[in-house]
Image: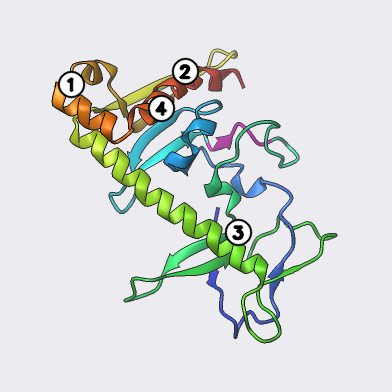
């Protein structure tokens, strides 16, 4: 989604801003979106939730939203299907946190090539004339910070599932009404059989960590895989 990301600072972007984003065309080729455990209960109604490792070998949860480079939930006008949950990973665009060279702190940045702005809307400035962050920029940073924190909690949760020996590699075939079949692979799901046969000690640990509701949401969501073929 991001093509040309630039760190935001009060010198370079003192007079910069961005208008309201009105379409999701930037995500039209996205076939899965990282989500956090804070989004499981909403996401499980619409999308399969699976687990995978990202490029840094960190566990992440993914909402499957398409295949063959096509997001199934965005129409020809760039609008997300009505009454479907839009993952925070997608809603945060064009903003993102990036790591600076030799630094542990993350810096707020944005995609300067963003073309989904409503040209008729009022521009939302990043900074005041005095160089202080505007309420808009502060709210954006809070949103991304919460997403970042939730992503860490999600990685820990999935890592725990793996430590409990509950994850297994899985692949899924999606059959379309046209008779086509597409295969999705490279992800992990909870093995229900292993979950049922855990030791009493591990089951108590799972309940203590309140993991059962999240595991249940994940398992329920998997029924959405075959529905993807009917879209």
Residue holding disc 4: 218
Q: Residue 180 — which label?
A: none
- The region drawn magenta spans 69-74
- Check the image and report above or below for 112 versus 202: below
Residue drawn at the location 57% of the way across and 65% of the way down: 110
Q: CA distance from mark 3 to mark 4?
A: 28 Å
Residue 72 lies in the magenta-colored region:
yes
* Classed neighbour count for the residue bearing mark 2: other residues with Cα under 10 Å, few (<14), some (14–19), many (≥20): some
Nearer the observer: mark 1 or 3; the answer is 1
Q: Viewer-proximal residue, 86 or 198?
A: 198
* Classed neighbour count for the residue bearing mark 1: other residues with Cα under 10 Å, few (<14), some (14–19), many (≥20): some
Evaluate if marks 2 and 1 touch, with contact meaning CB atoms under 8 Å apart: no
The x, y position of residue 92, in whole percent, is 58, 54
Evaluate if marks 2 and 3 touch, with contact meaning CB atoms under 8 Å apart: no
Q: Tell me if 54 is positioned left or right of 65 in this view.
A: left
Evaluate if marks 1 and 3 touch, with contact meaning CB atoms under 8 Å apart: no
Q: Going by the picture, which residue comes out furthest to the right?
A: 120
The x, y position of residue 123, in whole percent, is 77, 67
- Check the image and report above or below for 129 versus 72: below
Q: Residue 94 — which label?
A: 3
Q: Earlier in the sequence, mark 3 or mark 4?
A: 3
* Classed neighbour count for the residue bearing mark 3: other residues with Cα under 10 Å, few (<14), some (14–19), many (≥20): many
Residue holding disc 1: 198
Residue drawn at the location 34% of the way across and 39% of the way down: 52
**Element type where label 4 sits in the image:** helix
Q: Viewer-proximal residue, 56 or 162?
A: 162
């Amino acid at each position: 989604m991001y093509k040309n990301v630039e760190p935001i600072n009060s010198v370079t972007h003192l007079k910069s801003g961005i208008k309201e984003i009105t379409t999701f065309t930037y995500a039209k080729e996205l076939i899965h979106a990282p989500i956090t455990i804070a989004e499981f209960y909403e996401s499980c109604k619409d999308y399969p939730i699976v687990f995978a490792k990202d490029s840094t070998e960190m566990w992440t949860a993914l909402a499957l939203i398409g295949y063959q480079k096509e997001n199934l939930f965005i129409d020809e006008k760039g609008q997300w299907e009505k009454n479907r949950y839009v993952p925070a990973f997608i809603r945060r665009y064009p903003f993102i946190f990036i790591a600076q060279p030799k630094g542990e702190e993350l810096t707020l940045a944005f995609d300067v090539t963003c073309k989904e702005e409503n040209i008729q809307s009022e521009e939302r400035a990043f900074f005041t004339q005095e160089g202080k962050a505007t309420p808009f920029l502060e709210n954006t940073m809070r949103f991304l910070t919460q997403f970042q924190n939730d992503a860490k909690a999600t990685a820990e949760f999935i890592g725990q599932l793996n430590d409990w020996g509950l994850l297994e590699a899985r692949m899924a075939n999606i059959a379309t009404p046209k008779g086509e079949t597409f295969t999705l692979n490279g992800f992990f799901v909870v093995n229900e059989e292993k979950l049922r046969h855990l030791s009493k000690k591990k089951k108590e640990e799972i309940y203590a960590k309140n993991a059962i509701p999240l595991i249940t949401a994940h398992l329920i969501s998997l029924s959405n895989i075959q529905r993807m073929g009917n879209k």
